[in-house]
Amino acid sequence: MKKLILSITLLLINVFCVYVLLYTFISFKYQLILREDSRNKKFSLTKEQVESIPSFPNIGITTLPIKSQLAKYYMYNGDLSKGLELLKEGTKVNPYIFYSDFLLAAYYLELKQVDSAYVHAKKALYGWPKNIDHYKLFNKILAIKKDTTEILDTYDYINSIFTTKEQHQQSFIDSYSNAKLGYLIFRYPDQRPVNNDLLVGTWQQVYEFETGEISYLTNTITFSKSLYTSGDSKEYKYDVKKDTLNLYFKSNGKLISRMPIYYSDSLNTLILKNIPRSVIEDNPERQDQFFKKIK
């Protein structure tokens, strides 16, 4: 009788071990796909495949809760309620790495709900600051918000708790630069056509910011009553018709270029639009340029 009980017990243990190994093997196979999808920012698993992933083990080899990883697929396919449910369950499995908040921040940012993304990204960063992805995402959101002050404060915080790495430094530089560029003025709502009398003088190219800061570049252009002098000191005849600046060869009067031209009274800025970045390319990229009169 004892031998029979022992045999049954051993059989049950073996069945249990096989069950655990089988489900662990299946889970590991899917975890590899989850990791590759995360790395390549894609969602290769179908809903049926996601639902077939075993609930055991409930945590991945990288300590990320499996359910939190699966939540991304539901949210990607528009099932937000199921995704949130899985994120909550995943948080209970490992509440110390704030992975669910990180995913929610990324999700809300994708929807352009910046304020919601900010709340979750900040919670993820300050909850688990050693994860470089938490830091990068929070910086990205701060750059969108143009919050240079908090970018600086966050970098100081990271420096205060551990030695920052090159990735932290590069993320700080990129986000701070992007936040500053967010203040750069590209649109002038009060722009209007100009006339020759206004144009006469020397103009220096600038970048101006919503904060009132003005950055002067080295490029200058000069208008006399009939001649336009470019930044490389080449002279052309010109006239202004409506909102268009026409440039002509000085020697034969042949038209060589047309560009929209406007003036902002509120900021005293001359605006030249669609300026080619290169004169040697057939289809060069174009940009708007802005100038302040210096004399």
Image (tube, helix red, strand yellow):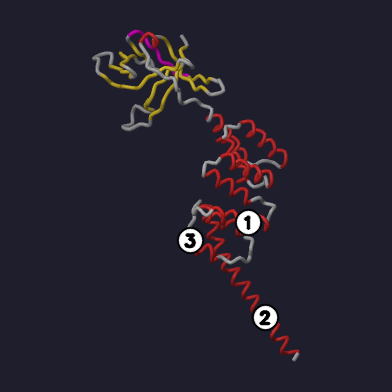
In the rendered image, the residue lying farthest to the bottom is 1
Q: Earlier in the sequence, mark 1 or mark 2?
A: 2
Q: Which residue corresponds to mark 2?
A: 12
| Three-letter amino acid code at the position of disc 1 | Leu
- Image coords of residue 275 (percent x, y): 37, 25
Query: Which circle, 1 or 3, is nearer the viewer?
Result: 3
Q: Quadrant of the N terminus?
A: bottom right
Quarter of image, res 242? top left
Q: CA distance from mark 2 to mark 3?
A: 34 Å
Give the numbered dot on residue 64: 1
| Three-letter amino acid code at the position of disc 3 | Thr
| Three-letter amino acid code at the position of disc 2 | Leu
Mark 2 touching mark 3, by CB under 8 A? no
Q: Is residue 294 left or right of residue 56?
A: left
Residue appearing at x 59%, y 45% in the figure: 105
Classified by dominant secondary structure, the portion drawn in magenta counts as: strand
Mark 1 touching mark 2, by CB under 8 A? no
Height in image: 184 above or below 129?
A: above
In the rendered image, the residue lying farthest to the right is 2
Magenta segment: 218-225
Residue appearing at x 48%, y 61% in the figure: 46
Q: Earlier in the sequence, mark 1 or mark 3?
A: 3
Height in image: 96 above or below 236?
A: below
Nearest the eye: 123 or 255? 123
Under circle 2, the secondary element is helix
Quarter of image, res 222? top left
Give the numbered dot on residue 46: 3
Q: Residues within 10 Å of mark 3 (few under 14, many from 20)?
A: few
- Image coords of residue 274 (percent x, y): 37, 26
Nearest the eye: 214 or 84? 84
